[in-house]
């Protein structure tokens, strides 16, 4: 038996069974684009997909469309009755989103900055899930958080991308080159916070928004962009 051929196929069939998607809706498992700098990594995308499947949000807001990779992951997990509202400020993203919307009737793009969010953008509905992966600017993230807070419920969840650190031993020339265009900080000789303002944003929430709790996901065993989940603090009914 050729285990090299058998095992990958077995894994893919198992994933299709467990997660309930078909080949056309699981492209993020087959493409390398999810491992590029700027996108959710493939492992992170699988996590996001599973999380969306568990939560079944009706209204999703995404700050940072970029090339539509994370939007594809979200739309593959939500039902047609759910809606994804995405924001970005580049002409490239605007044009890509225009083509993207032609095949996704529950996708809506806003060509404006995240801190310009307004309730009318989402028909004044409550937001179930938010992905923040855009400005990488502390002040803009804080302004955005204050704008969306009135539209969050006790069950709403926020995912903030790029809150992890890169281990130097896993970095390639491309990663070092990227540091020339980001606001980053070496925490020590072996680790760099590649988007330091995302970490500062999480710390701002911890220090100033006492009604919220945070949970950080990163790894020292691989080069991981990392993310943090943010939700309202509350007791469970018993």
Image (cartoon, rainbow, N blue to C red):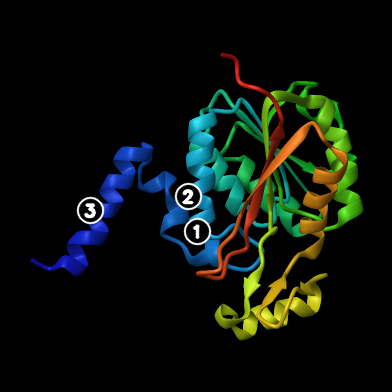
State the separation of the CA atoms marked 1 and 3: 19 Å
Say which residue label 1 marks. Answer: 42
State the image coordinates of residue 92 (x, y, percent, origin top left): 74, 59
Say which residue label 2 marks. Answer: 46
Answer with the quarter of the image where residue 4 lies.
Answer: bottom left
Check whether the beta carbons of the residues at disc 1 and disc 3 lie within 8 A of each other. Answer: no
Instruction: Give above or below for 234 relative to 168.
Output: above
Q: Residue at x 89, y 41 (%)?
A: 116
Which numbered circle lies on residue 212?
Answer: none
SS type, badge 3: helix
Check whether the beta carbons of the residues at disc 1 and disc 2 lie within 8 A of each other. Answer: yes
Instruction: Give above or below for 149 relative to 215.
Output: above
State the separation of the CA atoms marked 2 and 3: 17 Å
Say which residue label 3 marks. Answer: 10
SS type, badge 2: helix
State the image coordinates of residue 34 (x, y, percent, origin top left): 54, 61
């Amino acid at each position: 038996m050729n285990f090299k051929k058998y095992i990958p196929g077995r894994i893919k069939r198992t994933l299709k069974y467990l997660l309930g998607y078909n080949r056309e809706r699981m492209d993020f498992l087959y493409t390398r684009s999810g491992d590029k700098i700027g996108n959710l990594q493939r492992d992170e995308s699988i996590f996001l997909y599973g999380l969306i499947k568990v939560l079944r949000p009706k209204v999703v807001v995404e700050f940072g469309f970029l090339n539509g990779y994370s939007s594809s992951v979200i739309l593959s997990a939500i039902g047609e009755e759910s809606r994804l509202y995405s924001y970005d400020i580049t002409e490239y993203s605007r044009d890509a989103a225009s083509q993207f919307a032609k095949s996704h009737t529950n996708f809506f793009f806003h060509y404006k900055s995240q801190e310009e969010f307004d309730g009318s953008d989402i028909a004044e509905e409550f937001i179930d899930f938010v992905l923040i992966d855009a400005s990488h600017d502390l002040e803009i993230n804080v302004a955005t958080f204050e704008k969306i807070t009135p539209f969050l419920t006790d069950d709403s969840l926020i995912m903030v991308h790029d809150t992890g650190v890169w281990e130097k031993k896993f970095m390639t020339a491309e990663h070092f080159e990227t540091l020339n265009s980001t606001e980053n900080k070496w925490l020590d000789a072996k680790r760099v916070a590649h988007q330091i303002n995302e970490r500062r944003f999480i710390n701002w929430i911890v220090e100033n928004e006492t009604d919220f709790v945070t949970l950080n996901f990163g790894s020292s065993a691989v080069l991981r962009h990392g993310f943090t989940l943010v939700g309202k603090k509350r007791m469970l009914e018993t």
